[in-house]
């Protein structure tokens, strides 16, 4: 059956119908032929058995009076039976009493030397042998034996087989013609459905629908096909909407991250300006200490300023590390990934393993940026507080020096 996998459904249906008809005809005609053979054989057996009984009764007197010539004359009546090629009458002692042969070639064939068993049997070389006992006053006085050829029976069976073959061929052709027309009622809707599915696959148009022509199983298949296309079309619209929403969300997150980066840049600039001011204040404090000769006070002031500067330096390093480890690179990779799948972004987010992680990644990235922003604000506030502390120290020292 593997050879039929790539055969069209039209040919499969025709082959199915023709094969079923051929098998049914073959089985039915085989049964008829078998019955005819049995009937022909049984008819011939009954005919020859009845003939043997009649001829046996006619030869009763000849056997009784030992008149073999009369028995031979009786056996010559077998010429009216062309199927009987040879016959023989045995006396009570089992000796040959009279014989008959249709021609010399048959006469030269050896007959059984002893009376065969009563009844009939078919030989392997195509003959039917019939033996019947001959009785006179309830005493067996002989046996009559026939050997008949089965040529006429075979000829009759051959003619019958020829007729059967002709009927089968005509029936086969009629079934083929009928199947070639009727298969269209099944194959045509299936082929139409296949063409519609191919069109959907090539054109990527899920608005196509097929019109059913009946309420049978194919009609149900048409309904399910249309329902499937409708579901796919609805899912496609929803996926496109999700794609558009995702693009808007990505643009919004990108804008927010850009603003956060600009704010961080401003804070870094402010930090550098504050460091520069602190350095100028430090230099002024050193000069003031030297001018006023207040080494001890200057040392204390410098010590305090140094502690504050250490805090400022820690805050500056923290801000620098936060800016260096910013998540903007991850956002850039995400934007690049989305740009690579711009043509099928909806399908990428819905079906691809990496695409499915985009919403969760955006959520996690937003949370991380919020945390970083809060940390930067805290460090900036600490930095500003240290700067104000330094200013306070400087002002105090200037007031004391004055």
Image (spheres, helix red, strand yellow):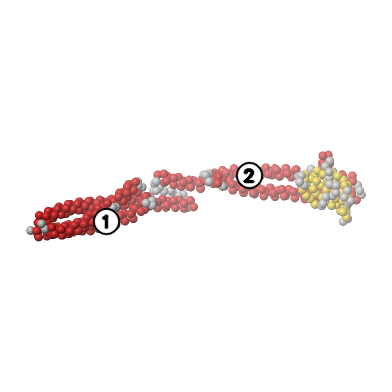
Q: Could you say which is closer to the camera, residue 94 or residue 219?
A: 94
Q: Could you say which is closer to the camera, residue 221 or residue 393?
A: 393
The image quarter containing residue 398 is bottom left
Specify few, some or many for label 2: CA neighbours under 10 Å numbering under 14, 14-19, or 20 or more.
some
The image quarter containing residue 286 is bottom left
Disc sitting over residue 372 in the figure = 1
Quadrant holding the C terminus: bottom left
Give residue 242's position: percent from left, percent from top: 33, 52
In this view of the protein, can residue 339 be seen by the observer? yes
Specify few, some or many for label 1: CA neighbours under 10 Å numbering under 14, 14-19, or 20 or more.
some
Residue under the point 16% across and 57% down: 302
**In the rendered image of this protein, does residue 284 appear above or below residue 168?**
below
- Asked if disc 1 and disc 2 are in contact, CB closer than 8 Å, the reply is no
Of discs 1 and 2, which sits in the foreground?
Answer: 1
Disc sitting over residue 168 in the figure = 2
Residue under the point 41% across and 48% down: 209
In the picture, measured across the screen, residue 16 lies left or right of residue 122, that is left
Disc sitting over residue 172 in the figure = none
In the picture, measured across the screen, residue 191 lies left or right of residue 323, that is right
Cα separation, mark 1 vs mark 2, equals 91 Å
Residue under the point 58% across and 46% down: 18
Give residue 155's position: percent from left, percent from top: 72, 42
In the picture, measured across the screen, residue 97 lies left or right of residue 200, that is right
Q: Could you say which is closer to the camera, residue 267 or residue 289?
A: 289
Mark 1 or mark 2: which comes first in sequence?
2
Residue under the point 10% across and 54% down: 291
Q: Secondary structure at mark 2?
A: helix
**In the rendered image of this protein, does residue 141 appear above or below residue 102?**
below
């Amino acid at each position: 059956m593997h050879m039929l996998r790539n055969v069209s459904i039209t040919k499969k249906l025709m082959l199915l119908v023709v094969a079923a008809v051929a098998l049914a005809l073959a089985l039915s005609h085989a049964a008829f032929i078998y019955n005819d053979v049995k009937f022909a054989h049984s008819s011939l057996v009954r005919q020859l058995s009845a003939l043997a009984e009649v001829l046996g009764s006619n030869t009763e007197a000849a056997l009784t009076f030992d008149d073999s010539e009369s028995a031979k004359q009786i056996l010559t009546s077998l010429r009216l039976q062309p199927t009987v090629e040879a016959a023989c009458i045995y006396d009570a002692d089992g000796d040959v009493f009279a014989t008959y042969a249709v021609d010399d070639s048959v006469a030269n064939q050896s007959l059984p030397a002893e009376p065969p068993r009563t009844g009939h049997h078919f030989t392997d070389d195509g003959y039917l042998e019939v033996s019947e006992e001959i009785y006179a006053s309830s005493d067996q006085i002989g046996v009559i034996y026939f050997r008949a050829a089965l040529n006429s029976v075979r000829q009759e069976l051959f003619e019958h087989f020829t007729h059967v073959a002709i009927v089968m061929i005509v029936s086969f052709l009629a079934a083929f013609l009928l199947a070639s027309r009727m298969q269209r009622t099944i194959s045509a809707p299936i082929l139409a459905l296949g063409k519609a599915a191919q069109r959907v696959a090539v054109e990527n148009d899920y608005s196509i629908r097929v019109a059913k022509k009946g309420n049978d199983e194919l009609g149900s298949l048409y309904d399910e096909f249309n329902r499937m296309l409708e579901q796919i079309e609805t899912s496609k619209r929803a996926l496109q909407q999700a794609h558009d929403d995702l693009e808007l969300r990505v643009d919004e997150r990108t804008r927010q991250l850009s603003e956060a980066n600009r704010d961080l840049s401003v804070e870094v600039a402010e930090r550098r300006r504050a460091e520069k001011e602190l350095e100028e204040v430090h230099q002024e404090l050193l000069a003031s200490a030297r001018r006023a000769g207040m080494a001890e006070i200057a040392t204390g002031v410098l010590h305090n300023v140094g502690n504050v500067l250490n805090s400022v330096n820690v805050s500056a390093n923290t801000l620098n590390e936060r800016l260096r480890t910013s998540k903007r690179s991850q956002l850039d990779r995400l934007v690049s990934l989305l740009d690579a799948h711009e043509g099928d972004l909806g399908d990428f987010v819905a079906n691809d393993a990496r695409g499915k992680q985009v919403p969760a990644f955006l959520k996690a990235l937003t949370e991380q940026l919020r945390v970083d922003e809060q940390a930067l604000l805290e460090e900036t506030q600490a930095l500003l507080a240290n700067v104000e502390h330094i200013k306070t120290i400087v002002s105090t020292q200037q007031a004391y020096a004055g």
